[in-house]
């Protein structure tokens, strides 16, 4: 049974960057305005995420790591209209199965917090803790009990780069939240609260340099889009700097990457690619994120409409810009 649990956990959590992704999701879902991510040795030694969100109720703290425990879905109709990033209650259970997990949390206006230490998915220790409102989760010794998975990890430098990538992609769609990434004790990235354009320019200063970008907004029926476009005077060699967000979630959706490239078709020759960030908001009933463990893929029912709105609007915007 323990082996099955670990294999299932390894599907959701395959490396330190997935821990960073899931803990960030939880902090964002908790309404935090300040989130700090600390990683040591690419997360292989330690990952710590601290937030000033709602905190976890002391009664819930003792069960939050159990499989399928979520405070975010109560009914099946909730599942049809997901507004939170998490909803499956898999992250903490998976993480605590493959690491030593320490959770410290102070709920709302409580004067005292509580902590639990989990090993092999079971509570090893618990007690009170002095901590301001919010949650601090520490992950140590990831995959030490799962050598088959540990063997697939890369060097600390590569794992750190993957953590940073996830961190930036996540932070991009939440400019109202301040994010810090601390690497081996040094501030690696600081993203203060700002607006969308400013956030993108701060997160990717060498690509989306402020003087080279333009922001557009458009609405059609029940679809609304915002995008930050890099001037075609700075063509890219691949599609790596095209980012797609649907309802605040970063997804890999090739047809929308293509829609953006198509919008640039008159100003970029073949073999050159744009850099752009697209945020689309569509009714939650039109998209299903529940098809991939990492929620990296989605099924978008109004994809043709969205595709055409994106390419048309970008095409028009680039004409205006270059005239
Ligand atoms: P999910 O996010 O799908 O609900 P998780 O396993 O990620 O599942 O988290 C389980 C539960 O633990 C959440 O539903 C939430 O109630 C609680 N939780 C986890 N992290 C935090 C946090 N940083 N702040 C507040 N509550 C949290
Ligand atoms: Mg979650």
Image: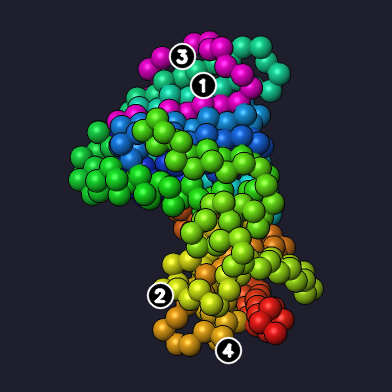
N-term mark: 1 or 4:
1
Residue 299 seen by the camera? no
Distance, label 1 to label 4, CA atoms, is 54 Å
Query: Magenta segment, which residues?
Result: 121-141
45 sits left or right of 230 in the view: left
Residue drawn at (60%, 26%) of the image:
134
Residue to which mark 1 is pinned: 104
What residue is disc 4 on? 266
Q: What secondary structure is marked by label 2?
A: loop
- Judging by the rendered image, the residue that carries numbered circle 3 is 126
Disc with the residue nearer the chain's start (1 vs 2): 1
Disc 1 versus disc 2: distance between alpha carbons? 45 Å
Which image quadrant: the N terminus?
top left
Closer to us: mark 4 or mark 3? 4
Which label's residue is closer to the chain start, 3 or 1?
A: 1
What residue is at 51 percent from the left and 56 percent from the top?
204
Residue underneath mark 2: 237
Label 1 residue SS:
strand
Would you say the residues marked 1 and 2 are in contact, meaning their CB atoms lie under 8 Å apart?
no
Residue 126 spot, x, y in % from top left: 46, 14
């Amino acid at each position: 049974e323990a082996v099955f649990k670990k294999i299932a956990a390894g599907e959701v959590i395959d490396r330190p960057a997935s821990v960073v992704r899931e803990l960030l999701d939880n902090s964002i879902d908790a309404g935090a305005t300040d989130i700090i991510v600390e990683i040591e040795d690419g997360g292989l030694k330690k990952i710590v995420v601290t937030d000033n969100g709602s905190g976890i109720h002391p009664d819930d703290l003792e069960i939050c790591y159990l499989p399928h425990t979520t405070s975010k879905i109560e009914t099946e109709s909730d599942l049809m209209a997901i507004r939170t990033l998490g909803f499956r209650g898999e992250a903490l259970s998976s993480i605590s199965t493959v690491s030593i997990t320490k959770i410290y949390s102070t709920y709302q206006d409580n004067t005292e917090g509580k902590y639990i230490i989990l090993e092999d998915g079971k509570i090893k220790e618990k007690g009170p803790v002095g901590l301001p409102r919010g949650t601090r989760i520490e992950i140590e010794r990831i995959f030490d009990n799962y050598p088959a998975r540990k063997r697939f990890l890369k060097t600390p430098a590569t794992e750190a780069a993957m953590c940073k990538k996830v961190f930036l992609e996540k932070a991009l769609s939440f400019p109202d939240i301040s994010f810090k990434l601390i690497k081996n004790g040094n501030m690696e990235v600081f993203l203060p609260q700002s607006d969308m354009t400013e956030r993108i320019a701060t997160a990717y200063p060498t690509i989306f340099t402020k003087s080279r970008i333009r922001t557009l907004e458009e609405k059609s029926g029940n679809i609304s889009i915002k995008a930050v476009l890099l001037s075609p005077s700075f063509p890219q060699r691949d599609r790596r700097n095209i980012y797609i967000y649907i309802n605040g979630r970063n997804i890999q959706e090739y047809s929308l990457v293509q829609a953006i490239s198509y919008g640039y078709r008159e100003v970029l020759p073949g073999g050159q690619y744009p850099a752009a960030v697209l945020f689309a908001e569509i009714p939650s009933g039109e998209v299903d994120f529940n098809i991939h463990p990492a929620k990296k893929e989605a099924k978008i029912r109004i994809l043709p409409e969205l595709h055409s709105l994106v390419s048309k609007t970008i095409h028009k915007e680039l004409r205006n810009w270059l005239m």
